[in-house]
Amino acid sequence: MTSRTTRSIATGAAALLVASGLAVGTGAAVAGAVPSACATAQTVTFNDINTLGTNYYLNKEVVGDGTAAPGGTVTFRTTVSGAGALVTAIQDFHPAGFELVQARSSVWYLLGGQTWTTVTNDVTRDSATNSVRYSGAGWTTAGNARATLETTYRVPADATPGDVLNSGAATNLALVSGYRLANPINTCVTIREPNPTEVVTGSLDGLGLGSVTSGSTALGDIGADPATFSADLINGLDLGQLIGAAAGS
């Protein structure tokens, strides 16, 4: 990745403070030491006077192999862990033009322990900073508990294969000057050429057919084996939907 030009798309967030009713005080964002080279996963450690000499960790990773095709999707996970302070917000900074498809959180509950929840309708999207923020009353980092925001985005159809796109992350802890920022964090996704399945899916999207399914079989699950691809594609079509669409045209 380091041999390619890295475009740092997540910008302008250093002045953005996450509001928190549990924060003891306010102050400028505290930045940690960010790794210098792009990778598919990075961790920044925060240890300062406001953390009382204890470590808090801000980790961001690209789920999967770290690549995405134009018009496809990519998923990031941002996780906060540490010495017990409450996490009141997690913020994901994404490359420009990426469109949020789904957001999930994993936080620790007294009843149920560490649990995943879909929070797509509960996040705040900020186009000015290319960010998605999820806030709450406070999630513990005591013991092995952690707070995670998982965000899935649609990659722009005009993204250029070969580009390496940077991203960022931030969190707000219930501490004095609790906003911790790593933007960029150098967790990067590489744009690649679409594979055969993605080419067909994109063509169907262009025709207004969207994600063609039959029962629980999605086009995205069809294998790329040339011997079976055509048959799987035909079997995956919802013929009733296609006939209805033709009759209404």
Image: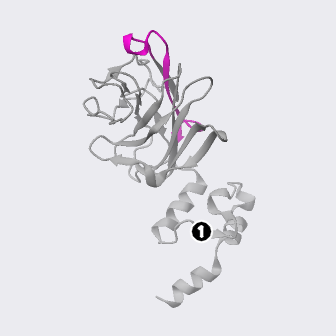
Which image quarter: residue 242?
Answer: bottom right
At x 33%, y 22%, the residue is 177
Is 188 colored magenta in this rendering? no
Q: Nearer the viewer, residue 137 or 60?
A: 137
Mark 1 nearby-residue class (10 Å; few <14, some 14–19, many ≥20): some
- Disc 1 marks a residue whose amino acid type is Val
Which image quarter: residue 215?
Answer: bottom right
Q: Is residue 193 visible?
A: no
Q: Nearer the viewer, residue 245 or 42?
A: 42
Residue 167 placed where, x, y %? 40, 34
Q: How is the image coloured?
A: one colour
Height in image: 63 above or below 142? below
Height in image: 240 above or below 130? below
Tag 1 secondary structure: loop
Q: Viewed as shown, does residue 220 lie left or right of 190?
A: right
Q: Nearer the viewer, residue 36 or 86?
A: 86
Height in image: 245 above or below 217? below
Instruction: List the residue tagged with mark 1.
Output: 212
Residue 183 placed where, x, y %? 36, 28
Number of marks drawn: 1
Q: Is residue 160 visible?
A: yes
At x 54%, y 26%, the residue is 141
Q: Viewed as shown, does residue 105 lie left or right of 23?
A: right
Which stretch is magenta? 46-68
Farthest residue, direction bottom: 247
